[in-house]
Each structure stands twice: as C-alpha cells, then as structure tokens.
Image (tube, rainbow, N blue to C red):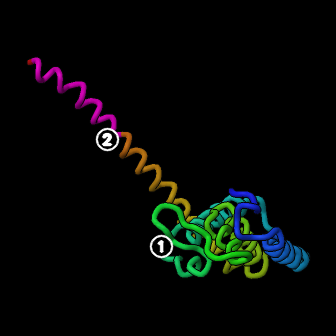
Amino acid sequence: MRPVEQTPTEPSDYAALSLTYGSLLAVLAASARDREAIEPKELLPLSAATFALSKLIVREKAETWIRRPFVEETPGEPRPRGRGLRYAIGELLTCTRCTGAWSGLALVGLRLHAPRTARTVTAVLAASAGNDLLQAGFSWLCARATSQQHEADADTLPRRRAA
C-alpha cells in the first residue's frame, strides 16, 4: 500500500471512510442491545460468508458494475480512479481484506436485525466460500498430479531410449 503522499488523496479522505465505518459500527452496536446475541458457533459461517462476499465484490467480473465508478479494470492489476474520496473508495474496492471489514459489518448487522434472512444469506455465501476452498484444493491436486506425471515421464524417457 502506498503512503498517502504518493496517492491523489488527503488524510481527510481516509478519515471520511473511517468516520462512516465507525458511525455504522456504533449505530449497529447501539441497536443490538436488545437483540438476540450472536453465538460463537455462528462466527465461522459468518467469517466464511464475509470472505465470499468480499471476494465477490472485489474480484468477480459479475460485480464490475459496483467497482466501475471507483476502479479502472486494467489487465493485471485494477487501479483506483480519480482523486480524493473517489480514489480512497477505489482502494477499498481493490482490497479483499478492506472490503471484508465492511462486508462483515453488513452481515453482522443483517444477522442482528433479520436473523432468519441472515442465516439464509450466510449459508449461501458460506457454501460459496466452501466451494472456493474445494475448487482451489482440486486445482492444486490436479496440478500436483500433472507435475508428478511429467517427472515420471521424464525419468522413464531416458530408459526407453536406452532400450
């Protein structure tokens, strides 16, 4: 991450984002007082759902419409657009960890204020995160098997030529 001095932003742009996040968090905390508590067993599915939602927003082509006002989709590395607050939001929308904090806030808020709906949304997003994990594992296994096959073929090729 580049220092503020190397971006077309001011500290006040980041302060606006922090103030907005902090205000939303404070409102959520105050409004949660008389709500059903979130059980520790719900944290893992909420974490998986937060991962999936932030990845969806930051990386997936289908969500380009959300990023487009703030992010230039260049080949390779997306870049924030504009100056000031627009640029700062663009930075936020190119970082899964940053967007994850906001996604987590939204999902916890939904869970506290509409528990049944939130459980459905969380289940769908957590299943998507599980799918990502399984797909990554499958790709890794396939790449490893292919690599081992190439190594085995390379070992047997000199023996075949000698025979």
Q: Residues within 10 Å of mark 1 (few under 14, many from 20)?
A: few
Residue sitting nearer the eye, 120 or 149: 149
Q: Nearer the viewer, mark 2 or mark 1?
A: 1
The location of residue 69, given as percent across then percent down, is 60, 81
Name the quadrant containing residue 57: bottom right
Q: Label 2 to label 1, Cα distance in Å?
A: 29 Å
Q: Which residue is mark 1?
A: 61
Identify the residue at image location x=52%, y=62%.
77
Q: Can residue 142 be seen at all in this image of the molecule?
A: yes
Residue sitting nearer the eye, 49 or 87: 87
The location of residue 51, given as percent across then percent down, is 62, 62
- Magenta residue span: 145-162
Identify the residue at image location x=68%, y=65%.
100
Q: Amino acid at mark 2?
A: Thr
Q: Can residue 25 be seen at all in this image of the molecule?
A: no
Q: Residues within 10 Å of mark 2 (few under 14, many from 20)?
A: few
Q: Residue furthest top?
A: 162
Residue sitting nearer the eye, 135 or 115: 135
The location of residue 136, given as percent across then percent down, is 47, 53
Q: Which residue is mark 2?
A: 146
Question: Of the residues under marks 2 and 1, which one precedes in the sequence?
Answer: 1
Residue sitting nearer the eye, 25 or 17: 17
Q: Residue furthest left?
A: 163
